[in-house]
Image (spheres, rainbow, N blue to C red):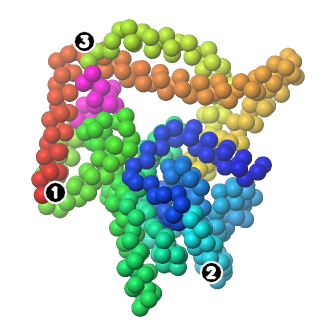
Amino acid sequence: MSGAAVRAVFLGLLRVFYPQIAVRGPTPPADVGTIFVANHPNGLLDPLVVRLALGRPVAFLAKSTLFSIPVLRGWLRAFDAIPVYRAKEADTAQNERTFQLARGRVDSGGALALFPEGISHDEPRLAPLKTGAARIALGCDVSARIVAVGIAYESKETFRSRVSATLGPPIDLAPYRAQAALDERAAVVALTARVAAALQEVMIEADDAELWSGFVTVASWLVGDADVGARDARARSLARDWRQLASRDPTEAEALADEARAFAHTLSELGLRDAFALDGGAAHPIRAGAKGLALLAMLPLAAIGALLGWLPYRIIRPVSIRLAKGERDVVGTYKLLIGLVLMPAWWCAQAAVIGYWLSWGVGLAVLALAPLTGFAALRFDERLTARRALLRASWLTATRADEARAVADRRRALAERITQATRANSR
């Protein structure tokens, strides 16, 4: 398979896995050499997310040992990956060639994605950075720039979840170039610190995973959940303000946290995920009926897709979790790779059996329809879930109007209290 075909397949699969990749912040011109530095929460999927978010070819560095794995070697080359050699695994003198290739990519006006933490991990905070990004940047032409990218996964190991990518402003390299002329090592250290600060500005950081999820949840109460980019931007602001508030007035910070936990419990007891669902009132019967009919029309295709793909679809998740051995940051990578192999193999096996017992024409028809009906099954499940949530909110509004109004008022009051606390904190 050609490199272009490999790229098309994997980028297409990633769009299926993460149907919404929201991008915020100014995208640099495509004709200016740029080093994009990003946090690294999700294994080999992070470079693909960066590429889709930017909408342009982006090379990236990958540890040299990955190139020795036959299954990955072609994939890495298709995405213009450059091997980087670590001391515990290879001769680091080879990195001089790595740096030459990386700088050549940027100097020719291309884009390079680096993950300066050096490892993929599941912590909700930025890990200490390696100096490679700074060393490469200081050796590039004067037109080169560094741009930080903060990647936030709604639920990175969950199929059909969402992602946001936030781009920061370009880092001015001129002061560090001037410093490098006098003391290169000091310039590298200073620029690495600046890169870390830039990344922290575009990331949602928290002390632990529970608090990280809490910022995202509260942000959805403040701005809604439809626009994942806007929600994550609010969560990022909340995280920064929370740290300052907790330092200045820990009692008030804990009181707000308790109130937020109590409201989350109330929503859970009512079976609601979207705190804004009660603001819209009961669903219009005609519109609800039309959407219900559209969903019903999808049912035959969705049923066929579920029948043809249910077993491998259910197998992929537990197998991926087992292979990941507790490391959530690689579950998504395993899911994508296993799904790429297992689903087509299963469809081919079914087509062969049906072709043998019925006719090869029927078998080929099943093989052609399996991916289409499988996607229809996914869309049906998503729309059915959304309809259930809407109907649940509408039923609560229609049958328990006072309680629904009280919950909606409580959300608005909590949002106002959080807003006032963060405003006071930012003064």
Whether residue 99 is visible here, answered yes or no, is yes
User: Residue flagged by tag 1: what amino acid is it?
Assistant: Ser
User: Residue flagged by tag 2: what amino acid is it?
Assistant: Glu
Secondary structure mainly formed by the magenta segment: helix
In this image, 310 relative to 137: left or right?
A: right
Could you tell me which secondary element the residue under label 3 belongs to?
A: helix
Label pair 2/3, CB-CB below 8 angstroms: no
What segment carries the magenta color?
A: 263-280
Which quadrant is the C terminus positioned in? bottom left
Residue under circle 3? Answer: 399
Q: Position of residue 55 (x, y in %)?
A: 54, 49
Q: Which mark is residue 426?
A: 1
Residue at (33, 48) in percent of width and height: 233
Could you tell me which secondary element the residue under label 1 belongs to?
A: helix
Most foreground residue, 100 or 131: 100
Residue under circle 2? Answer: 96
Residue at (58, 24) in percent of width and height: 377
